[in-house]
Amino acid sequence: MIMKNAEILFLNNRTMRELGSGDIQAGMADVKRIYSLFNYKNERGEKVEKLTIPDKVVLRFGKGNQSEYTDGRINAMPGRVHDDDLNFAGIKWIGSGVHNYELGYPRANAVVILNDPYTKLPICIADGTEVSATRTGASGGIAVELLARKDASVLTICGAGVQGRTQLKAAVIARPGIKEVGIYDKFPANAQAYVDEMSKQYPQISFHTISEDDLGENVAKSDIVITASTAEHPFIKAEWVTKGTLLANISGEEMERGCVLKADKTVVDFWQSVKHRNSSTIARMVNDPEGGHQDFVPTAEIGEIINGQKPGRENDEEIIYYNPVGAGVLDMIIVHRCYETAVREGKGQKLIFWEGDE
Ligand SMILES: NC(=O)c1ccc[n+]([C@@H]2O[C@H](COP(=O)([O-])OP(=O)(O)OC[C@H]3O[C@@H](n4cnc5c(N)ncnc54)[C@H](O)[C@@H]3O)[C@@H](O)[C@H]2O)c1
């Protein structure tokens, strides 16, 4: 048998950016599509599997969850999408190098591999760093669209890093009426840099930094509170949370467990994955054998709300807690879109992965 060459298209961070890896609006459409496929039901109301999302594998460099904050980790997130006109498989491999900023590299850095669903050969290796920030911002933006008050105008963001920026971008797309944004960070210089940068991008919004002492007051007056930090311990108190607030717990356990219990509705993206990853407040709460909440079940997965199977926000009084854990397929759908554009426009570097006999 004569073997043929097999090529991989390599797309680095700059090429990915040219191809739209940072396009939050497009990312929101992509992420919404994946969420809706997860909870897809046919006309007879039967669940149809269109996504395969194995549990994340967490490669730790120390012992236990908390070591991720000091020693970092690399997560493997494989997945497959098999819908009529959307068919791909692959893996996201995302590292968290906790000292990388000092070295001039991004903390979170990701590579995404797409495989051909028929041959299973790798067809694309792409930088997924911006993609990861875009899809997580998009996930927050979708929650703001479906779960925040329609008249939401005050937003608090905890964590002035990469995600703190994409969360803002997506939130403003979902609620253009946002007028005031407070940013809290353990390092005030990060919060100030965020204010300086974002004030230029969004001149219609009034930005301010929040100190530890002012955090309670700011949470209390916010319509939306987003946590996107690398904090190791909870710092948002349930007693601060007022009626009508959307609490979007994008990262770890920044919110006290009481925030989840106080919520009228709790919404996640993929419940099985949230519990398995065990990093967010809701996950730690149900996984704690001493906590007394092991049977707790969230009100909805977000795909059920997108597909109209369950309601989103029903009035201006509800407190809603949201936690997305993410999945590799969310990154892959964006990389797949960029890959198709690259093939059409002849962008990226072709590498011969398998040299045949030709
Ligand atoms: N849910 C998801 O799908 C998803 C996806 C990607 C990232 N994340 C998580 O989002 C978080 C933020 O990621 P990033 O890329 O923006 O990180 P980053 O390193 O760019 O920024 C993190 C920010 O948090 C701040 N911070 C650290 N400790 C804090 C504390 N105690 N209080 C307030 N601020 C504190 C840091 O100073 C920094 O500015 C990470 O925990 C990451 O794991 C979640």
Image: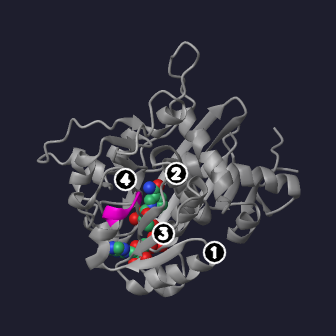
The count of marks equals 4
Say which amino acid is labelled 2. Answer: Ser
Alpha carbon of mark 2 to alpha carbon of mark 4: how far?
Answer: 17 Å
Alpha carbon of mark 1 to alpha carbon of mark 2: how far?
Answer: 21 Å
Percent coordinates x, y for residue 196 in the rendering: 54, 83
Horizontal side, residue 313 vs residue 124: left or right: left
Check contact, mark 1 vs mark 2: CB within 8 A: no
Is tag 4's residue or tag 3's residue first in the polypeptide sequence? Answer: 3
Instruction: Identify the element where label 4 is drawn.
Output: loop
Foreground pick, 141 / 45 = 141
Query: Mark 2 near ligand 1 (CB under 8 Å)?
Result: yes
Q: Nearer the viewer, mark 2 or mark 4?
A: 4
Say which amino acid is labelled 4. Answer: Thr
Say which amino acid is labelled 1. Answer: Gln
Q: Which residue is mark 2?
A: 139
Q: Nearer the viewer, mark 3 or mark 2?
A: 3
Q: Which residue is mark 3?
A: 180
